[in-house]
Amino acid sequence: MADERWSEAFPQSGVLIGISSIPWREAWKYGMRAWRYCQHDCGHVIAAVSYAAAALGWQTRLVEAAADDAVANLLGLNRGEDFLKAEAEAPDALLWIGNPELRPDLERMLIALDSV
């Protein structure tokens, strides 16, 4: 059942990439500027992925409708009880690579995720 829900939510061509950061790894060195540097690094990742996709003739689109909670759910970052002693990861962005006309349906993906 979950496989059917995923196939309905996710187009047959393309890939979804999630990006996350661990702000503490920057905070020990940069202090209050850590969050800014995490966002800067996220921008570098988006640019590098976009250039690589363009070189292959694909397009990259930011899934703007995805709130932090939704991205955390999709990436499995919402399981705080599993990572009590580990460094917390923050969801940064969700990228769709493929045909921009065939973007995934975020709501359906979250429903499919809940059914797993």
Image: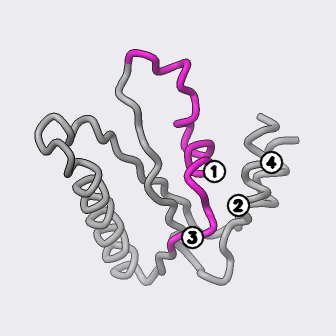
Q: Could you say which quadrant of the image residue 98 lies in?
A: bottom right
SS at mark 2 in the image: helix
Hey, which residue is sitting farthest right in the picture?
1
Choose the circle earlier in sequence order: 4 or 3.
3
Residue 101: x %, y % from top left: 66, 83
Residue 102: x %, y % from top left: 68, 77
SS at mark 3 in the image: loop
Given contact means CB atoms under 8 Å apart, are the residues at marks 2 and 1 in contact? yes
Given contact means CB atoms under 8 Å apart, are the residues at marks 1 and 4 in contact? no
Residue 77: x %, y % from top left: 52, 36
Answer left or right for 68 relative to 27. Answer: right
SS at mark 1 in the image: helix
Q: What stretch is highlighted in magenta?
A: 62-85
> Depth check: 32 or 4 in front?
32
Residue 12: x %, y % from top left: 69, 66
- Report the mark closest to the observer, 2 or 1: 1
SS at mark 4 in the image: helix
Where does label 2 land, which residue? Answer: 106
Where does label 1 land, which residue? Answer: 70
Choose the circle earlier in sequence order: 4 or 2.
2
Choose the circle earlier in sequence order: 3 or 1.
3
The amino acid type of the residue labelled 4 equals Ile
Where does label 3 land, which residue? Answer: 64
Question: Is residue 55 placed above or below 80 in the rendered structure?
Answer: below
Answer left or right for 7 relative to 62. Answer: right
Q: How far apart are marks 3 and 2 (CA)?
A: 10 Å
